[in-house]
Image: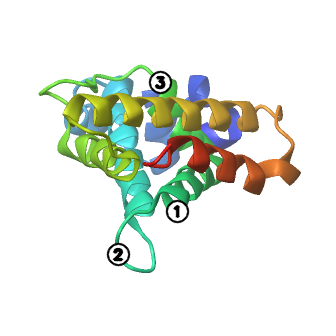
Amino acid sequence: MAESEGWPAVTVRRLADAIGVSQPILYRHFPGGRDDIVGRVVVDGYAELAEAMAASDDGLATLPGLIGAYLDFARTHPAVYEAMASARSSIVFASAETPAILRRGFALLEQVVGGSDARERAVRAELLWSTLHGISQLDAHGRLDAVLDGLREEAVAALFARDA
């Protein structure tokens, strides 16, 4: 529903009708209604993204591999990525309340960008995440030349290489 009509079209009523259950059944599983449902999409999306970013031939995330995996995920799961990036939910970021799977994904970013201490790693990871999010958003709205995708990914990797 979100893929074809956008997140504003996703309501508890429409979801219940689409999956063939009553609204009270959905509210039993998601007491916060739509916000809880979107929150679940957000957490599941970050879990999938973290899994994609962690994958590589040697089992360790690499900077170019992570960049490619992040951008590919955003391209191939646009509605999920939109929810992850901007939908209203009860998910808390950058705090002790942040779900473990979100912290795992951020730790992958910290791992590939490195830094001399925890603060530098966190800042570099935030900057990489922000850069990838910006590219994803511009790409989703047709504002980037797809022919340049590979060069763009290489340029981002060069900006965040550990010896940069």
Q: Is residue 15 visible?
A: yes
Using the numbered discs, state the Cα–Cα distance from disc 3 to disc 2 in whole angstroms: 32 Å
Q: Which quadrant is the N terminus positioned in?
A: top right
Kind of residue indicated by mark 2: Gly
Which disc, if any, is residue 87? 3
Using the numbered discs, state the Cα–Cα distance from disc 1 to disc 2 in whole angstroms: 11 Å
Q: Is residue 79 above or below residue 76?
A: above
Kind of residue indicated by mark 3: Ala
Question: Going 67% across and 46% down the picture, which residue do you hit?
Answer: 155
Q: Nearer the viewer, residue 12 or 75?
A: 75
Q: Is residue 1 visible?
A: no
Earlier-in-chain disc, 3 versus 1: 1
Using the numbered discs, state the Cα–Cα distance from disc 3 to disc 1 in whole angstroms: 27 Å
Which disc, if any, is residue 65? 1
Disc 3 vs disc 1: which is toward the camera? 1
Question: Going 62% across and 29% down the picture, which residue do you hit?
Answer: 134
Question: Going 50% across and 42% down the picture, which residue do you hit?
Answer: 164
Which quadrant would residue 102 be assigned to in this image? top left
Earlier-in-chain disc, 1 versus 2: 2
Question: Going 47% across and 38% down the picture, which residue do you hit?
Answer: 15
